[in-house]
Image (cartoon, rainbow, N blue to C red):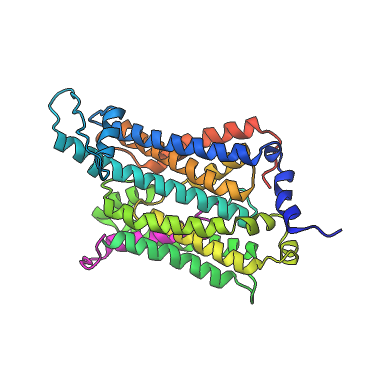
Amino acid sequence: MARTVSEALSEPVARYPAGIGIRRRSRVYSMLLLGALLIVVILFATGVGSVPIPIATAFEVMVSQLPFVNITPSVPDVPGGTLTLESLRMIILDIRLPRIILAGLVGAALAVAGATYQGLFRNPLADPYLLGVASGAGLGATVAMLIPFTLTWVAFGAVPLFAFIGGVGAVTVVYLLGRVGKTMPTTTLILAGVALGSFLASITSYLMTIAGEQLQGLVFWLLGGLHFTKWSEVWVVLPAVLAGFVIIWIHARPLNVMQLDEEQAQQLGINVERVKLILLGAATLTTSAAICFTGLIGFVGIIVPHAVRLVWGPDHRFLLPLSMLVGAIFLILADTLARTLVSPAGIPVGGITAFCGAPFFLYLLRKRKGLAFF
């Protein structure tokens, strides 16, 4: 007997042992708890640094910026000097908070894009950089650093602009190369992405050999970091990440159906090629917008969706928002560790994500031994 769309939507959960017994209500409660945890993590990260600030003081400073709220934050005593109310607000609102918010946005974007790619390609090794976004963005940033003139008309400098164009351009070329007629075979796309990524990476490697004094800054960008973040960068990334997430989450049900088989999804009324194109475009634009200011931060897009899927199941209606929250929390904590571990210089946050993420992922795999991903 032919299955209905609702039966097909529920099958991926039934095929995945972690999804058994996990009710909708428990996932909703988990999202609420993770949202509260995200707020706590933001407050905690705001207070950590070369100038320690109590969480209560950080909260007072943030609340005092709200309209119709008249609060005078208490200024804490700091060792080795005095701290004024003006300097306290500058440290929290102008230095730490923009960096923390941008870290959360980038972590959320990479996690959601990774979950989308893994579901779209039905491949547990897929990540946001699968189709050449990293190689394209890296080449774009390299070219921007090496050009012998300054683009004064670019408000944020040439590096974020060129990185964004490079990431989107690379995936566009992969799409044009991998498309066969009116269809978009996933295997062909992956092969085209690997080939083009290797080609662009080789060009970047050559340019690095002639970079000269720009080499250190280029290597630091390629490793990923959030130094000198400004609110203007946050306001650019925020709408791109929100728009990409909304587009992807709207297509969560078709993405669930496509976990069965593309032919079965087509028979159930899903326009597979259209959904694939929309999801690829949204995930690519979200990833490119997120990393153009921060550089290439790895491991978030592959480990966070896996961890969420192992704990809460593979239903993309919940997997996507849960991945967004966990990704934001994970990268905020990783960046806090990156900027305080070797203070005041700091280290690239990409190294922290890989160092902390890999053991945690192996632990989850050990706890769920024998569990199939798809």
Residue 133: image location, x then y, percent: 46, 59
Dividing the picture into quadrants, the one containing residue 212 is bottom left
Q: Is residue 139 left or right of residue 57?
A: right
> Which residue shows up at 38% across the image and 41% down it?
349
Please identify the residue farthest to the bottom as the structure is shown. 181
Residue at 46% over, 51% down: 109
Image position of 143 with respect to 18: above or below: below
Q: Which of 205 and 312 is in front in this view?
A: 312
Which of 259/89 is in front?
A: 89
Rendered view: 332 above or below 216: above
Residue at (80% x, 57% y) in the render? 3
**143 within the magenta span:** yes
Point out the stretch of residues depicted in magenta: 127-156
Residue 284 visible at all: yes
- On the image, which quarter does residue 103 sit in? top left
Locate residue 206 relative to residue 86 in the image: left or right: right
Q: With 200 as the anchor, is 234 left or right in this view?
A: left
